[in-house]
Image (tube, rainbow, N blue to C red):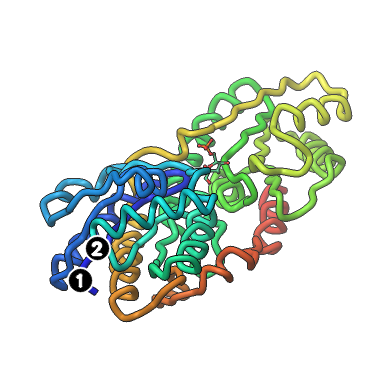
Amino acid sequence: MKRIAVFTSGGDAPGMNACIRAVVRGAVYHGIEVFGIRRGYSGMINGDIFQMSSHSVSNIVQRGGTILKSARSKEFMTPEGRAKAFEQLKKFDIEGLVAIGGNGTFTGATLFYDEYGIPTVGAPGTIDNDLYGTDYTIGFDTAVNTALEAIDKIRDTADSHDRIFFIEVMGRDSGYIAIQSGIAGGAEMVMVPEVLTPISEVVEALKSGWSRQKSSSIVVIAEGEEEGNAVEISEKIRQQVQTEIDMRVTTLGHIQRGGIPTAYDRILASRLGLGALEGLMNGEKNVMAGIVNNELVYTPFRDTIRLPKPISEDLLRMVKILSV
Ligand code: F6P
């Protein structure tokens, strides 16, 4: 393989730049020409493709966001869009791709390979940590730490005013950010989409806290929670508890997607970027590079897309035990 391209796609995640850097520097080291594609599949369709060098990735290992920018392309999900993308890659003689993104990105790459035979190796870049085939995804650790910093601050004011706070964190279909930031932040309750938590159970936990003179409580709620968003859940609880205790809601939102990546994310991203590149060079295709039990592994896209990555119920049990 003589020429490859790298791109980021889907929601951005802190550490994506460290991953791009590893792909580019790895390619330079191995004597392969490397191109960057801006704005993911949209840029591939529009030919927003440029040659990269070791210098193009200087001074980015510490930066959040992605220098290649990102997008969620509807056009690439159509056969016409993919045909345009293939024509653009042909112009640059690109023989293989490293895709940094999540499930949507890998679904697109699979369709593209089936139609045009361009091999892709993926690196898991999403704050949600919802990809089977890797213990952690790039950006997750930073997002958890960002959420945790906010929870710690909210705890101060919750305690001063004897309030209950409902804090909504990101995770469209996944409760990983909620469970980890909730445990580290000492939450009284964590609600995640993977496990049903009836409102009555939250009410019981809060009441039991009050009976033990707890003056403030924090409930961390994942965005994709079945019972609704944090505002809806707080209303349901308000109706059931009939209390004078003040309640407030904070939705953390996109703050969790930005910021300086943690050391953990930079190292993970570097390993996965180089792993994806070297996998591509060694003939891997339609697979995602991941780290499982500290080993580099390649998992077929069809499994990363299809297989669930359940949250350990032990962790949810632990939240209850530790908040008594
Ligand atoms: O997939 C990452 C994520 O941050 C989800 O947690 C969230 O639901 C979604 O992206 C938000 O996407 P957008 O930035 O397009 O609103």
Residue 165 rendering spot, x and y as whole percentages: 65, 29
Q: From the viewer's perspective, is 314 left or right of 282?
A: right
**Identity of the amino acid at label 1?**
Lys
Nearest to viewer (mark 2 / mark 1): 2
Quadrant in the picture for residue 113: bottom left
- The reply to whether discs 2 and 1 touch (Cβ–Cβ < 8 Å) is yes
- Earlier along the polypeptide chain: callout 2 or callout 1? 1
**Residue that numbered label 2 is attached to:** 93
Residue 217 rendering spot, x and y as whole percentages: 68, 34
Is residue 10 or residue 296 the one in the foreground?
Answer: 10
Query: In the image, is the residue at mark 1 within 8 Å of ligand 1 by its beta carbon?
Result: no
Locate ligand 1 by image quadrant: top right
Query: Crowdedness of circle 2 by 10 Å Cα count: few (<14), some, many (20+)?
Result: few
Secondary structure of the residue carrying numbered label 1 = loop
Query: Crowdedness of circle 1 by 10 Å Cα count: few (<14), some, many (20+)?
Result: some
Residue 209 rendering spot, x and y as whole percentages: 76, 39
Q: Residue at x 59, y 50 (%)?
A: 183
**Identity of the amino acid at label 2?**
Asp
Is residue 243 or residue 259 the one in the foreground?
Answer: 259
Q: From the viewer's perspective, is 103 left or right of 48?
A: right
Q: From the viewer's perspective, is 90 left or right of 318?
A: left
From what the image shows, is residue 93 above or below residue 143? below
Instruction: State the residue lying farthest toward the bottom.
Output: 282
Give the Cα separation between the discs numbered 2 and 1.
9 Å
Q: From the viewer's perspective, is 169 left or right of 90?
A: right
**Residue that numbered label 1 is attached to:** 2
Quadrant in which the N terminus is drawn: bottom left
Q: Residue at x 13, y 71 (%)?
A: 31
From what the image shows, is residue 73 above or below residue 242? below
